[in-house]
Amino acid sequence: MKQYIDIDKWERAAEFRHFIRYSDPYFGVCVNVDCSRAYAAAKAKGVSFFLYYFYRSLAVANALAPFRTRLENGRPVIYDLVHGSPTILRNDGGLGFALLLWNPDFQAFCFQAEEAIAAVRAQRALDTSMDRPDTIYYSILPWLRFSSVTHPLDLPRTEGVPILTFGKCLEENGRRLMPLAIHAHHALMDGLHISRFLELYEESLNRYE
């Protein structure tokens, strides 16, 4: 479900009207996330670390309204729930896109996600039919430890979907750190919202026992 936002009553009406005019309204940050506790616990329990950090990021995104806000024909809309759409490496070496539906139950989320990922890996061509605005786009780069990243954007035909990019997780000074880049539409959110996401996300990862 979604609802249109009344711009005249929206707290960020001025920011929206300003940045919506930009030819490239996206901005981004790149940080290292401390995932030491979550990584160790996931390995000890035999849980997929990828699915766990993915699940936690989607939980935080659903808790923050700016990460559920999109553009529809130039108008802001907010979704009740958003899901995850990660890049997947297919068995033939090509690129695929999966749709991982949000479920607050971690085991149920993993069951559906594993089936969806397996189906994409078995594909023999790029299928974009599952592309939806009520998602978060994820780029997964487990081979790279990066300090910045850019993305191809189909501007101005964009729905304002945030893009999260995860990189290679490495140990450094006794901590396990993973690069995370976040790109977002400046008409829909600011750096403060991304900072709040990162704060809640790292807290969430370190609560895993």
Image (spheres, helix red, strand yellow):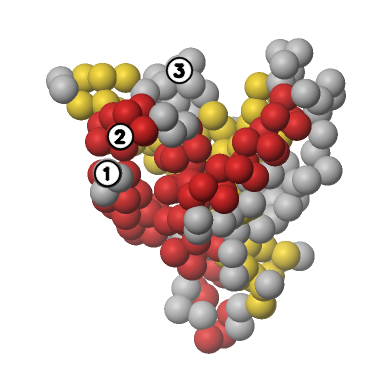
> How many numbered circles does the render carry?
3
Q: According to the image, label 3 marks what residue?
A: 144
Residue 201: % across, % down: 35, 49
Q: Are marks 1 and 2 in contact (CB under 8 Å)?
A: yes
Q: Secondary structure at mark 1?
A: loop
Q: Are marks 3 and 2 in contact (CB under 8 Å)?
A: no
- Distance between mark 3 and mark 1 Cα atoms: 27 Å
Residue 104: % across, % down: 50, 58
Q: According to the image, label 1 marks what residue?
A: 209
Q: Secondary structure at mark 2?
A: helix
Q: Amino acid at mark 1?
A: Glu
Residue 41: % across, % down: 30, 34
Residue 82: % across, % down: 60, 58
Q: Is residue 34 above or below residue 102?
A: above
Comes first in the chain, label 3 or label 1: 3
Q: Nearer the viewer, mark 3 or mark 1?
A: 1
Comes first in the chain, label 1 or label 2: 2
